[in-house]
Amino acid sequence: MKKFALLLLVAPLALVACGSSHRASAIDQVRAAIAKTANTSAVHLVARLSATQWNAGNHRYTFRRVDRGDADNASGVDRMTLRNPRTRAVLTSAAIYTRIPALGSGGTRWGRWARISLGELKRARWDEYVQSYIPYSPASLGRVRRATEVAPGLFRVLFAGAPGRAEVRIAGNGYVTRLRYREGPFDETVTLSRFGEHLHLAIPQSSEVVHT
């Protein structure tokens, strides 16, 4: 999976074609929507990933995962939470905190958080590990090189930083509300909503963390 850049929390692309009396071109509409979405204080996301692969026995299988979470940019610290039946994760600009369920006599319960420094992961060149926690975003895929409107509000987009195929849905309020990105066996759709809501995404306390 490509890196989600902590869910649209990267420097926004420049707005263009301001003040024109004509309808903006497809590429200008996409660039403006990405910039507006990147600048929102908070957003809720649902990321659906599927990948079709073959195992050692040359049997085809499909991996599917659904992550739900929130991203907070208002606090000045990039944070994102993700949750699915197998994992809880909190991402900041400095570290990834993860925990997995532990089975006990009382049924499923969550264990302590593990903290993994992003700097250590990068020095070890474990970028794929980092990327596996971060869904795609329009901003993370790079500069928009080409865009075609295939239906009202739906654009087929080629990003400079990604060779795969992307579709971007823009709502009437100007936000990117859906991104679908396909490359090889991977197909991911990220739905964005609840823009600008007040969020407080807490980082796990030191007493809850096992440092790695």
Image (spheres, helix red, strand yellow):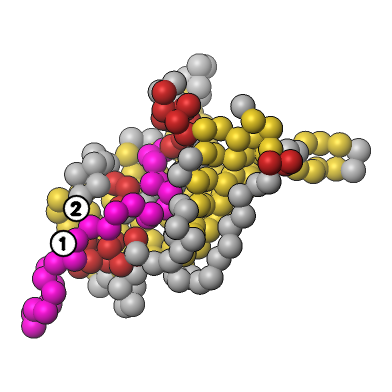
What kind of residue is marked 2? Answer: Val
Which residue is found at the position 68% from the left and 41% from the top? Answer: 206
What kind of residue is marked 1? Answer: Ile
- Mark 2 surroundings: few (<14), some (14-19) or many (≥20) residues within 10 A: many
Residue 151, x across and y down, in percent: 24, 68
Residue 39, x across and y down, in percent: 34, 64
User: Majority secondary structure of the magenta segment?
Assistant: loop
Which residue was labeled with disc 2?
Answer: 144
Picture quadrant of residue 167: bottom left
Picture quadrant of residue 97: top right
Specify the segment rendered in magenta.
1-26
Instruction: Give the number of the disc on residue 27.
Output: 1
In the rendered view, tell whether residue 38 sits above or below residue 185. Answer: below
Secondary structure category for the residue under label 1: helix
In the rendered view, tell whether residue 28 sits above or below residue 106. Answer: below
Residue 195, x across and y down, in percent: 44, 70
